[in-house]
Amino acid sequence: MDPSGIFSTSYASDSALVRTRAQWLALALFGAALLLYPWLASPRLVAVANLMLVTSIVVVGLQITTGYAGQINLGQAAFMGVGAYGASVVEVKFGLPFWIAVPAGGVLAALAGWAFGLTAARIKGFYLALTTIAAQFLFVFVVLNLPSSWLGGVNGFSLQPARLGPLVFDTDRALYYLFLFSTAVMVFGAFGILRSRHGRAFVAVRDDDVAAGMMGIDVPGTKARAFVLGAFYAGIGGALWAYQIRFVSVDQFTLFNSIWFIAMMIVGGLGSIVGALIGTVLIRIVQESITTLGPDLIEFIPTLSSDIVFASMNVFLGLVITGFLLLEPKGLMHRWNIFKATYRLWPFPH
Amino acid sequence: MQRRPFLTCATAAACGLLLSTAAHAQTTINVAALADFAGPYANVMNDMQGGRLAVLDWWNKEVGEKLKVRIAVKTYDTRYDVAQTASLWPGIKAELKPALVLGLGGPDAAALQQRLPEDKVPMLFGTAAYGFGWKPGQWALNIRPTYAHEAAGFVEWFRATKLEGKRPVKVAIITSEATPAYADMAKGLQSYAKAHPDKATFVEAIWTEVQPADLTLQVRRLANAGTDVIVIQTNTAQAVATKRALQALGKNIPIMLSLHNGVAGSSRALGDANGFAGDFEVGAIADASEDDTTARKFYRVLQDKHGLKSGWNAMTMIGLGQTIVAVRAIEAAVKAKGADKVTGEAVHAALLAVPFTSAELMGLLPGVDFSADSPFPTGSAKVNVATMKDGKVVRAAGDVAVPTVPKW
């Protein structure tokens, strides 16, 4: 909400993502900080940032499917796995470079998402949740049971580092820039999609699919598209993950991961791209801080045994997430939006 | 006369300084230990970690002091999660500069197997290996051969002792498709049976859930096919379901278990302290039998002098086994390169170059000889076979040779 007296005078300014000079300045400073980050941060923090960037893409995809289109998806990790395996097959079997392998991973995951999107057109709620859980198990069974010459079977896939001409992405710093660029493109794309006719259709279907149908929206098609898009994002994330770890196996993409992705989306705020990013960063920071704190606590207080320290750390992690959900069930973005509206309108209450 | 006390004090101070310099001359070599105190292995991690720390304490006091080397360990909780291990590793490498990593399981291998050769830090696992890790030039090494190798060693022993070598053993496996690790065990056993038709006939792989409710139908099928031995590795729930099925059918087919789901633990899960009597527990590492073995004596030393509180069980053994190989490799690297030149690369070279004997490994392992071709010992690999009698684990056979198994 803009304060009284500030209004757009053209369609371009009305639809702009960045609307004021202050916002441009803040964005430029944020961009500069992101570019400088790997030179200022420790190797561990760069590795953490890499994971955050890859996970962000997957969670943004989930936000499109669940947060915007209202289609519950408990199989996002499976779609991520399809992307990782897709990219691996394209690189290992066909010898294609990573800049083809990564989008190919996304497309293959989108195809898998389409198959589940078709079921979403017919069922909803708990039934859809169960169907997407099935995606998680199907993924494992398909990979393990197809001939190992196709998808590696139990052996998985080992990948070479991503290369782009003379550039080799074999260090955490190099990967950071690759992932940062990919995340920026995907996030920008998400904003574009959600501000388009399709994005508005997603929201309409989420809010009331019967009313949306009455208004002429193709409800089954919209639900399927939401799954296709969400899975495409997961596939891109999975393909990038494959180039980070350089070894892909089915047990890297579990139901447990899917649940973490949902937690990230909820903590950040349903129905917000920035919320998905904030949720991912926040959950990861809490996880990593706790993981780092454990060994240091044992070192400084040797009388504390490892099992007590590490178990306590994880209880603390659970409490932090529960606390977030209790105190701000609409997610951090809701709180931020209230704060933003308040300072923009200050000193007036409305 | 007044100069004498001054001289005495000065001499004492000089001696103190010298001693302190000598103490400072001690070189510290860092080791990173990856643990899971919050994931699926949280309930057994304490035993394994206790084993690791006791061996390090023993080595520092008994061997390190003479070499003027101290091995320092820092533990990291990975929650048995690939992402967590991947994010931790750059920090571990930069801050700790470890000469070796004590790994826990599959997620650690998945996250680091491509990075370790570039970072030149070896990682040791205490579990048996998997076929999917059977690649040359690895830096993630298992101190035991694959689960399929361990099962094959048992099958040949069973054929020689129970069937008197008259016919091939009809062997079946009950496992799951839930993870690559479970599926790998069946594929490896099939590979062995295919290569040795005179020793083993593969009846069937029963693919079931990780925690099956009932296996009566499947076990009846195996019984009708004349199965001699059922192999179930690393899964207690499947072992218990199979035992219940055998009891319901009134059949007595021996079950071969691994250390993770050994006869004692599975009997407890069954609710009968002697429930797995006559079944077998097999591993290429000291078994948890009550016999007065070299490993058991070493365990008592660690209990008495080095604060070991972990029980005499498989997880403790895994911790003891991986750490004894680690300290011996570091010791070999110190002797080869000098204490101040021990890097991950030097330790890896020592692991590949030096065949460690069972005596050097305090009887915990039959001997370990890594090669560049496989990330686990094959040449010296032997398994111990334990069984259950009157509720106690007793050794049935020791140092049973492991046959060759073709890659699968």
Image (cartoon, grey):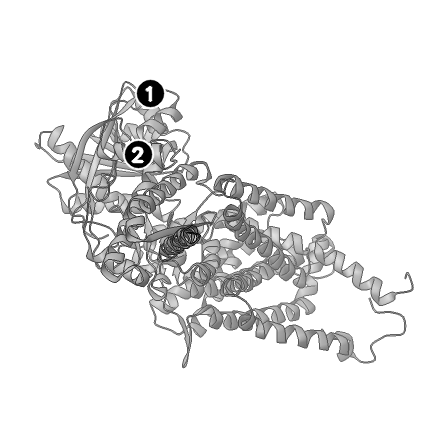
Left or right: residue A227 compared with residue B161: right
Residue B186, how many percent across, how many down? 28, 43
Point out which mark residue A293 bears.
Answer: none
User: Viewer-proximal residue, B337 or B405?
Assistant: B337
Tell me residue B387's x, y (percent). Answer: 24, 27
Identity of the residue drawn at 22% across and 31% down: B293
B46 to the left or right of A149: right
What chain does mark 1 sit on?
A: B
User: Does residue A195 appear to the left or right of B391 in the view shown?
Assistant: right
Classed neighbour count for the residue bearing mark 1: other residues with Cα under 10 Å, few (<14), some (14–19), many (≥20): few
Q: Residue furthest front?
A: B1
Residue B231 versus residue A77 in the image, above or below: above
Q: Who's the residue at 35% across and 20% down the image?
A: B273
The residues tagged by marks 2 and 1 sit, at their Cα atoms, a distance apart of 45 Å
Please indicate, yes or no, whether residue A260 appears anywhere in the rendered image: yes
* Res. B248 mark: 1
- Asked where in the image residue B116 lies, by quadrant, the reply is bottom left
Report the quarter where the C terminus of chain A lies. Answer: bottom right
The number of numbered badges drawn on the structure is 2
Which amino acid, mark 2? Val
Q: Residues within 10 Å of mark 2 (few under 14, many from 20)?
A: some
Q: Secondary structure at mark 2?
A: helix
Which residue does the image show at 65% across and 57% down from the upper left?
Answer: A219
Q: Is residue B258 above or below residue B334?
A: above
Kind of residue sitting beneath label 1:
Ala
* N-term-proximal mark, 2 vs 1: 1
Mark 2, residue position:
B301
Helix, strand or loop at label 1? It is: helix
Where residue A167 appears, as percent x and y from the top left, is 43, 78
Position of B76 relative to A170 (above/below): above
